[in-house]
Image (tube, rainbow, N blue to C red):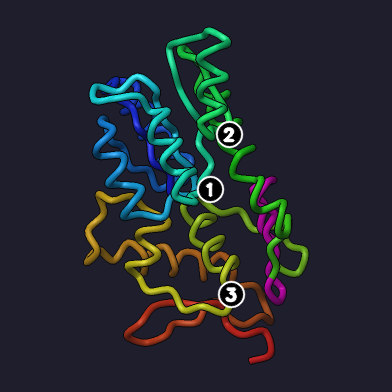
Amino acid sequence: MRILVVEDDAPLAEVLRRGLTEDGYATDVVAKLVDARNAVEVNDYDLVVLDRGLPDGDGRDLCAEMRESGRHTPVLMLTARDGLGDKVEGLDAGADDYLTKPFDYPELTARIRALLRRPAEAQTPILSHGTLEMDPAARRVSRSSITIPLTAREFALLEVLLRQPESTHARTDLLERVWDANYDGLSNVVDVHVANLRRKLDLPGMDDPIETIRGVGYRLRPVNA
C-alpha cells in the first residue's frame, strides 16, 4: 500500500517516512500544499497523512478539494491545534480521522491500520485465491491452513496480487504500489522480492502460485490451471 505524508516539519516527516517504510508501506513525503496537490493528481494513494499547517496554505483545503473531485482516499489529518473547532473544521472538510500533535507513533499507525481496513471490510475481510488466504487486518497469510511468515514488503506485494488475482501486474506497477517514488524503475527489487515470496510459498506437493508473464510482469496462477 502507498501512503502520502504531507508534513513540513522535516524531523517529524523523516520519522514518519522511516517508520512507515519499515512497516511495509510505500511512503512519499512532501512539505508543501502545491506538491501535495501534484502528488494526488499523479498517484493513486491508499491513504494521505495530512498536516493542516503548511507553508503555503491549510491542509484542510486539499482535503476539501479531494472530496469535491470525487477522491475518497482516506485522510488522517495532523495538527498542532487541539481546539474542538479546529477538529470540526477538519472533519467537515472530509478528513476521516484527526490526530493532535504531539502524538505517539504507535497511535498513528493504529489509526492508519483502522482507516485502511475500512474499504477491505466493505468488500471482503479475507482475501483468498486457491490455497492462499490472507487476513489483511491480522497481517496473516496461510496456504492450506499453514501459516507463512512474511516480511512487511512481501506481505504488501502479495496483497496487491491477491486483490486483483486475474490481472497481470507490470514491474513498474508493483514498484509504484509497494515501494515509494525514490526507487528506480530499472531496479530488480521486484524480482528479488517475488523470488523470496515464491520460496516461502513453496510447500511440498503444491505448485508455484505466482506466474511470470514474460516481458510483462507477474500474476497469480489461475486456480484451475
Query: Residue 59, how many percent across, how many down?
Result: 38, 28
Marked residue nearer the N-terminal end (2 or 3): 2
- Closer to the camera in the image, 115 or 221: 115
Count all numbered tags in the image, as a single digit: 3
How far apart are labels 2 and 1 at the CA level?
A: 10 Å
- Closer to the camera in the image, 131 or 112: 112
How far apart are labels 3 and 1 at the CA level?
A: 23 Å
Asked if residue 177 is among those painted magenta in the image, a careful observer would answer no
**Res. 72 mark:** 1
Give the residue displayed 45% in from the left and 39% down from the top.
Answer: 48
User: Is 119 located above or below residue 53 in the figure?
Assistant: below
Amino acid at dot 3? Pro
List the residue tagged with mark 3: 165
- Specify start and end residues of the magenta stretch as a single range: 129-142
Query: Residue 46, how many percent across, how many down?
Result: 49, 49
List the residue tagged with mark 2: 96
Query: Residue 44, how many percent across, how many down?
Result: 41, 55
User: Is 154 located above or below residue 5 in the figure?
Assistant: below
Specify the farthest residue to the front: 68
How packed mark 3 is, by other alpha carbons closer than 10 Å (few <14, some 14-19, many 20 or more), is many
Amino acid at dot 2? Asp
Give the residue displayed 30% in from the left and 23% down from the top.
Answer: 54
Marked residue nearer the N-terminal end (3 or 1): 1
Give the residue displayed 25% in from the left and 49% down from the top.
Answer: 182
Please, what secondary structure does the residue beneath circle 3 have?
Answer: loop
